[in-house]
Amino acid sequence: MHVQLSPSTLKRARIPRRFALFLALSLASVPSVVKAQTEGAATTRADAQATPKQEKPGAETTTATRSRRVAEAKQADPKSADAAKGADAAKNATGTKSTTPAKSADEAKNANSATRSVAEEKPAAVEKKPETVEQELQRRRTEIKDAKPEERAKLERALVDRLVELNMKDEALSELRLAIHDDRYDPAFFYNTGNALARLGDANAAADAYRKAISQRKGNYARALNNLGVVLIREGRWDEAYDALNAALTQENFTYAEASYNLGRLHLLRGETNLAIREWTRTIQLDPGHVAATAALARAYAEDGNTKRALAVIENYTARAAQVGGTVPREIAYARDEINNGTVTEVPLELRVPAAPSNNPPRVASSSAASSSATSRNEPARASSQPLRALSVDPATYGLLQQAREANDGGKFDEAVRRYRNVLSHSGGYLPPANLELGLALLNLKRDAEALAALAPVAARDSSRYPVAHYHLARLYERQGKLDLAAQEFARAAELYGDEAPQMFLELSRVREKSNDAAGALAAMESYVASIARQGSVPDWATEKLNALREKAKAAGEQKPVTNAKP
């Protein structure tokens, strides 16, 4: 640092001469003083770097101390040597500086990563044992128990599907039967539970599930009503089935094709061919691609004596299929061959339920599917499932028959009777559908003797085609107090219907019990229970009734008949 003050500067500052001279001399000495101080500081730093660090007198180095202590530990206890060495290392880390250079940041990071990798590899090295079936099912049941209400139904369906997959049908049925008693508001859940039960063959429990679903919707559940109707038909409970199917149709403003088809099947079982034709015609109008309804309608026309109309139904379906590039199903081809050959075949009713929840109405199985299903269960076939000769009626007579049916459907029974008699006069006194429908019209008018005369020829000549004739004759004989004849007709009806109408066995048991035939009543009741068991679970009331009849037969001193004997 060097400062220069000129005389002019001093003069402008108005400093006296004596002070100006002193100031100039003082400032001139500053650079040398600053330079001397700087050089002294540099010398001091250099001396400090050149002088080595001195240890405390009498103190050992860290390395020497550690070596000495390890040697002493080995002499005293070799096993504790490593522990002592570790203790020194810990002490050195906390209190004494290490003589080894510190690891770099990258080295430390790599070491930590390697440690983590080893830790992560340890669980993978231990193989997890596969879950046994019992453990899996227990886990699923625990999940159902702990699940939220909105998730429970899905888990329960998954459990049932798994049990079916494992071929554990009894366990699956047990789960489904327990589900019926769940205290929850979930109509769709109970509807699907009914479908699953029907699919597994438990018609009685399926009916309970459908009823619960219907009840929760205050009766407004057309799909459940339709399926309930089919189950009731299978159990032979025709009146209840009619109410359920008719309710399903009414709720859908008679646009529910599947319910209309099922109602047609019920009418055919009751011998009401004209009503069956009406329902199947409506079914095809609502669903032109309904295969089962098309085949049933064609067969019904052929049985009714209108072969030309029967073939027209088949050809209309074939033409529609050709327009859209489709093929003709085997059911349609079989029906056409039967009609052309002058034979028709009836098939048992079978419910086909959806495998998963669906917004579409469930379909009833097709003819071939129903036949194969019945065969797979080794159920006794209905006699009318064998080929029957198609009727041959001239157009004029068939027109008269339709006029009689219109009067009958309109509740004009007196006019219907007159027109049916006119049809018979044009047919030599016998035409099976006319005789049968005349007998039913006379029953509505309480003219039992005339009804008996109209129905008896049908039962004698065409019982395989119209087994319902035996049912109506049995009711007439029972009304007249002729219990033995009533029992004979009920037995014949039960034999012809087989598992398609197990209610006939129940009616037979009731009539035989009224006539004090305890052994016969027991045999018929056992046949009823066996038929219901083939469809699923047996209701409690049926088991109780069977046990009561066994006690009654035992008390009467009669020998218990063989269960599978003919009623």
Image (tube, rainbow, N blue to C red):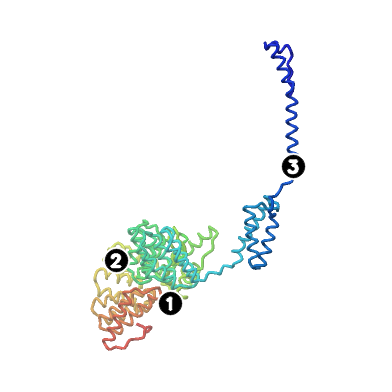
On the picture, is 238 further left or further right than 516? Answer: right
> How many neighbours does mark 2 have within 10 angstroms: few (below 14), some (14-19), or many (20 or more)?
many
* Quadrant that contains the N terminus: top right
Find disc 3 in the rendering and name its residue: 49
Q: Nearer the viewer, residue 231 or 482?
A: 231
Residue lying at 69% horizontally and 14% vertically, measured from the top left: 19
Indicate which label's residue lies in the foreground, 3 or 2. Answer: 3
Front-lying residue, 277 or 425: 277
- Give residue 2's position: percent from left, percent from top: 74, 22
- Quarter-wise, where is residue 418 in the image? bottom left
Sequence-wise, which precedes: disc 3 or disc 2?
3
Which numbered disc covers residue 416? 2
Q: CA distance from mark 3 to mark 2?
A: 135 Å
Tell me the kind of residue under disc 3.
Gln
Tag in front: 1 or 3: 3
Label 1 SS? loop
- Nearer-the-camera pick, 561 or 428: 561
